Image: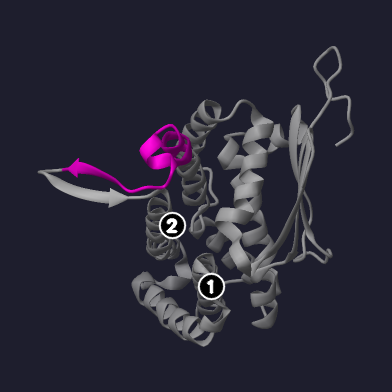
Amino acid sequence: MTSHNRCLIFLQRNSAIQRMSRSPSIGNRHSVVRNVGQGQRCSTTLAGAENWLRAQAVSGSKKIFLFNLNRQLGKQSEALSMEKMYVERVQQVFDGLHSANTHLIVDERSQYHLQAACLVLAAYRVLTDQLNIPSDQVIKILQQCMGDSDSVGERAVRYSLQMCSKLMFRDNFASLTATARQMADVDLGKAFDVSHEESENLQISRVSGCFYNSFFVKHGAPELTAPIFCKAEEMLFEKASGLTREQLRTGDVTFHLRSTLAEGGDQCLFEVKRHRTTGDGRSADPT
């Protein structure tokens, strides 16, 4: 799933929960029947709405990835204007990888994780083995396919998310801690081992077991985890809050990814901290 799609799921879920909790008929999770279109009626629950939203995001993310890959290959001289053929080859390699690793699916979210990992590995193999594109260049291409860019569209998404975040949360600390909790509850799922520590001014999430790190180590491509998936988790906090990386490093509320399994740490450590400030507005706490 592209990074901004995941952020939109988080914000839409929070928004849905807030709206539904204000309705007696929805707050108790009973079905609500409404007229839709020309007299059609549909019954939905909070759980049903969440499941539908997630399913749409997962199914759409593969199409978006392959669309982005086709566009990125069109910029590579090595593809010789045959990007469609190479995208089809990526699809073939993906099918083989996915069918051989379905045992890794342990819950609904791991369906997406397996899909994303197989797409990235399939594209990496085709682009390095068949097109002879250097691995560091391929990783940059894959980052673009996963939604890591500074395009006009990405900036528009960031601005929209910032506005939504300001409406939904009382401050940046509340926004970022909600993102950390939902990273585990909504996005990662049972394929990851996650624990939380939270106090008034500090929230720490520890990941001691990572699906992506294990997958890519097993398949001989550990170099893919950190620059693509660890970076995507960092971007999740940026986009969900609407803040830039610099703002998240130096503001009165900061976010840091202190260590990762992919880079040799014994855990991935996500830290959100609210700092005391001095009279001139500078942080009185070390980062």
User: What's the distance in space between the residues labelled 2 and 1, CA to CA?
Assistant: 15 Å
Which is more toward the observer, 199 or 104?
Answer: 199
- The segment highlighted magenta reads 15-36
Residue that numbered label 1 is attached to: 114
Mark 2: which amino acid? Arg
- At x 50%, y 28%, the residue is 163
Residue 191 location (% of width, % of height) = 62, 69
Compared across the picture, whether 33 is left or right of 284 comes to left
Mark 1: which amino acid? Leu
Work out whether 132 lies above or below 49.
Answer: below
Looking at the rendered structure, the number of numbered marks drawn on it comes to 2
- At x 52%, y 56%, the residue is 144
- At x 43%, y 82%, the residue is 95
Label 2: element kind: helix
Magenta stretch: includes residue 26? yes
Task: Please tell me in which quadrant of the rendered image residue 89 appears.
Answer: bottom left
Residue that numbered label 2 is attached to: 54
